[in-house]
Amino acid sequence: MGHDPVSIGIGLNEELDTPDLSDPLVTHAYVVTGEDLAESAESSGITRVHISDYLAEGRTVYFGEPAGLSVAMAKAIAEAAMERDGEKYAYWGIVARLLAFNPVGKIVNLACGDWADKKVSAALEQQRREFCSQMAAECLQAAMPAPLPGCLQMPARMIAPLRLLRDRAVLPVRTGPFRKT
């Protein structure tokens, strides 16, 4: 888990949403675009990062291979991610997830007829802002053939990093953990 406030919030929300001690707590997702390269939605926006830098920071890294991955699909996923370089981070997307997936947020959304979630989602789509797993899910959704597997049938803004990693219909091959040695 990351040590910044956003990662801590995502991690706590993930545990409230899908507590499962058999899987790691995952707070970030990115799209691998080359050897040691990935597009990542960071607090500064979507940017190219070196995976080795994550390891050097002491982060634990897992890799998931999409179902039916081919060279053409891998290229399409990477291109979709690289096209997003420079877009802003969706802090309000995290708020929308909190509204949607924790007990207090569920009550607020029920009382308001999902008004808050819909307002935040509409604002995010208009401003073209994404958070990490939303970006990864949208890239997978754009490149994978229909019908989409598992959680990719959901709107990308509703897919958290842990849900994406756990979904064996989407990422049947998972390797890791990898840590700084």
Image: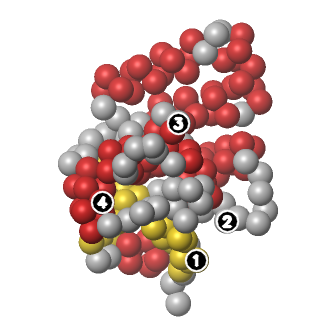
Local secondary structure at mark 4: helix
Residue where numbered disc 2 is placed: 24
* Vertical arrangement, residue 110 with respect to residue 68, above or below: above
Which label was assigned to residue 53?
Answer: none
How far apart are the two marked residues, 2 and 1, measured between alpha carbons? 9 Å
Q: Earlier in the sequence, mark 2 or mark 3?
A: 2
Q: Residue at x 53, y 70 (%)?
A: 173
At which x and y percent is residue 21? 78, 62
Q: Amino acid at mark 1?
A: Pro
How far apart are the two marked residues, 2 and 3, measured between alpha carbons? 22 Å
Residue where numbered disc 4 is placed: 73
Which label was assigned to residue 177?
Answer: 1
At which x and y percent is residue 58? 53, 75
Instruction: Tell me if mark 2 has few (under 14), some (14-19) or many (20+) residues whose alpha carbon lies within 10 angstroms of its own.
Output: some
* Vertical arrangement, residue 107 with respect to residue 63, above or below: above
Q: Is residue 45 visible?
A: no
Q: Is residue 143 left or right of residue 105?
A: left
Q: Do the residues bearing badges 2 and 1 touch, measured as CB atoms within 8 Å?
A: yes
Residue where numbered disc 3 is placed: 154
Placement of the N terminus among the 4 image quadrants: bottom right
Q: Do the residues bearing badges 1 and 4 touch, measured as CB atoms within 8 Å?
A: no
